[in-house]
Amino acid sequence: MTDLDRRRVLKTGGLAGLALVLSPELLAACKSAAARTPTKEKESHFLFFTQHEAAVVQEATARLIPGPQDDPAEAGHPGAREANVTRYIDTLLGALSLSPQRIFAGGPFSNRAGWPTDDMATFIGLAPAEAWAWRRRIGAWQAQYRTGVLHLDKAAGGSFLEARNSVRDEVLAKDEGGFATLLFSHAAEGMYSNPEYGGNVQLVGWRDISFPGDVQPRGYTPAEVSKSDGPDPYHPSGIGAALIGLIKGSNGV
Amino acid sequence: MARTRTLVIGSGPGGSTAAMVLAEGGHDVTIFEKGRSYFSDLTSKRPGTVWSNDELKGDRYFGQPDPLAEPRVFRSSASDPNPYVGAVQPLPQTVGGGATHWDAKTPRYWDIDFQKLSLLGPIEGAAIEDWPFTYAELAPFYAEVESLMGVQGDVAQLPALTLAHAPRSGPFPMPPGPPQYSSLVVSDGCRKVGLHPFPAAMAITSETYDGRPPCNNCGFCSGYGCPIQARVAALAPLRRALLAGAELRVGSQVVGLRWQGSRAVGVEWLDEGGVRHTERADAVVLAGNSLESVRLALLSHLPDPNGVLGRYLMFHWFTDGSGIFFSERLHNYRGRDHTHDIDDFADPDFPGARAAAKAAGLPYFRAGKVELGGTDRPLDEAQQYQQILKYLSPGRPFGAEFKQLMRASLLRDRLLGLTLMGEDLPYATNRVDLDPSEKDWRGFPVARITYGPGRYELAAQGFYMPWMTKLLKASGADVAIAIPELSSARFPIGDSTVVQTAHIMGGMRMGADARTSVTDGVGRHHQLDNVFVGDGAVFPSSGGHNPTLTIMATALRNARRWL
């Protein structure tokens, strides 16, 4: 049964009427089928991206925030691919096509810290001024993604997806039109934001940086707030040492 | 007493406090709030809410003016060739105003803030004045607001200096909650170098108070709406205003005051759908914060015979200290941002300060309080590394190195932040007016801010910055730096070229002389008998402490004298 057929049935028959003629076994079968259908769609259907755009964004963000299969140095550390950053970005770019718009997650609590329901999964609709601003903001981003993916392909010699990692990195480092910068910003958001926005799947982003995320309504105990967690020595080297040098150099004193 | 039709513009700390006084005084009060309400029943002591532990939501301007739809313009001086258009000093634009996702620190101002001219003296180039009232006169109103909101603190731990300048007649409504680990670490460092840390006064519950639960230390505090109402601020007076019969109109933008002769007669406002309405008024209270109240006054062409409207704007000059710890993580993501302060640098007689001021050609200078502790969150941190890697790894400014930085977390989990808020003097050149070209989404001219530090501010900043690194090193930080939040010719390396302190004062200051002030000794407009200002715009001086408690206490004191 296609979606269109299903809608017709429901519209003519009505949900209650339909349920009456179905046996409990059939109903259970329908429910599990319905539960499977969106999952299948989730893998293949995007709000904004074409299949090709999604594939390029996935491979590009995996260079920016690599996981174990993208960089051997990241063995054991999930990246953009594992966090499903592509889904996050697609949800952002298509946020205004959903009702309520997928810009502001709800509250006060998720179900991650002792609350029975995930209030954050119910989004908050935009006020007119906000809708006005987000139409412009997202409209501009959509155009950047559309042309940005074309440019990535072109700069990679015709196909970003077929290019070697070293070529992909070179192309991204060039940052033509600021697209890689935009992509990196969005990828980081998808990596480390609340999972209700579509990324940070299984909290892999937060876990990788030892950040617990939202903790309401449980909160933290006074001891957790006031006491040291114990020694955790860091020995600056490589990029960390370079960062320390930069920080020291920016001292105003 | 006649029942007057009173319109209050803005539901933040000042507007809600004024509305409470007027509604409980039997007047017919309507509160206009441009933003939406993110609370369920505002007459409940503990309304439900959709504020949450969600960094991205804040980054997307939830509950704030969206800078695309409602930008402001910033210039470092009148001759700034590159004005900035975007988010400038954005405060929450929602029911509860700036105090919905504030840090809730509620120090009192000092006696020398209210009598700056008579106790400390003039400074050349600045328009130093006394307030129309002294600390002693405001003290009971401070106590009343502290009790209304529920403030935690410990008089016994307040330094002698603080108590000498801001004496208290009784204890805080609640004891301090659990101290933040990082605040304890840096408090130790302060004591080692002779400074005097103490548990900060803050409007956050540490125990069940007025029907609200104690704070459970979720960590999403400064910059986030409280999901459990352990921090209600403006909602406390707003609730009382509503219970006394006040009406709250959300999503309503007042776009003009109508006035004739020496009286306002009503307002024009747009509902959320953009439909224009007029509303009759016997009295109008401006309480949208300095920037928006002045903007509305200018849009309404309120009389300004002496050209004072919008001048003497003050923001505090902020300076950030950053200590980085290699030995351990400080887990600043738990708790209330920071729990301790020092007041030492607010003292004009701090050791060496008089001599340094003299060397700079000034009779004295002051900085202000330092907040001890605080850090960034992951999305902010990621953004910083993204920018930094462009310098450090230009050939490949992403990839495994980015993730290594995120895990090492030098700028978040190993960071101990300090914020020094320094006193701004009132200068005629620091001002807000209407931008000649930029408009908001509805076509109304936006506020243009012209602001820069003077000799006084820069001399004090230069003197106290080394103290920031000194106390961080004494706390055991492996790296300790201090950076002004706003860059200037003297300190070109700043966090930003646009001021973002969220402390907004002046622009319609109180005073007896209509040539140098916009409002009188109770915040009444000098030329319009029934127009009152209920926000921080009335401040004649900025002090060196967070302004919200003083905004509320002043609104309480003044509103009781209005009608």
Image: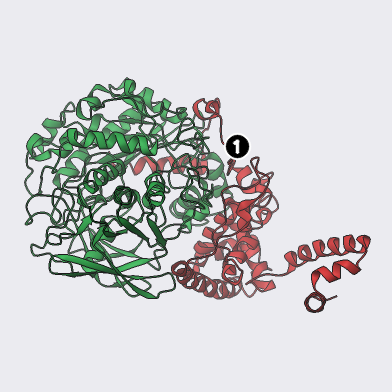
Is A112 situated above or below B183? below
Front-most of residues B296 and B88:
B296
The reply, left or right, for residue A106 in relation to residue B241 is right
Residue A121 location, quadrant: bottom right
Please tell me which residue is depicted at 58% across the width and 53% down the height of the picture. B399
At label 1, which amino acid type do we have?
Answer: Arg
Let me know if residue B489 appears in the view. Answer: no
Residue B465 location, quadrant: top left
Q: Chain of mark 1?
A: A
Front-most of residues B90 and B246:
B246
Residue A50 location, quadrant: bottom right
Q: Residue B249: percent from the left, percent from the top? A: 40, 62
Q: Residue B419: percent from the left, percent from the top? A: 34, 39
Let me know if residue A137 appears in the view. Answer: yes
Q: Locate the N terminus of chain A by quadrant.
A: bottom right
Colour that chain A carries in the picture: red
Is A14 situated above or below B324? below
Q: Residue A184: percent from the left, percent from the top? A: 54, 59
Counting every numbered tag in the picture gives 1
Q: Locate the C terminus of chain A by quadrant.
A: top left
Q: Residue B189: percent from the left, percent from the top? A: 36, 24
Binning the other alpha carbons within 10 Å of mark 1 as few (below 14), some (14 to 19) or many (20 upward) gives: some
Front-most of residues B420 and B118:
B118
Q: Secondary structure at mark 1?
A: loop
Residue, disc 1? A218
The reply, left or right, for residue B154 in relation to residue A1 is left
Colour that chain B carries in the picture: green
The reply, left or right, for residue A97 in relation to residue B284 is right
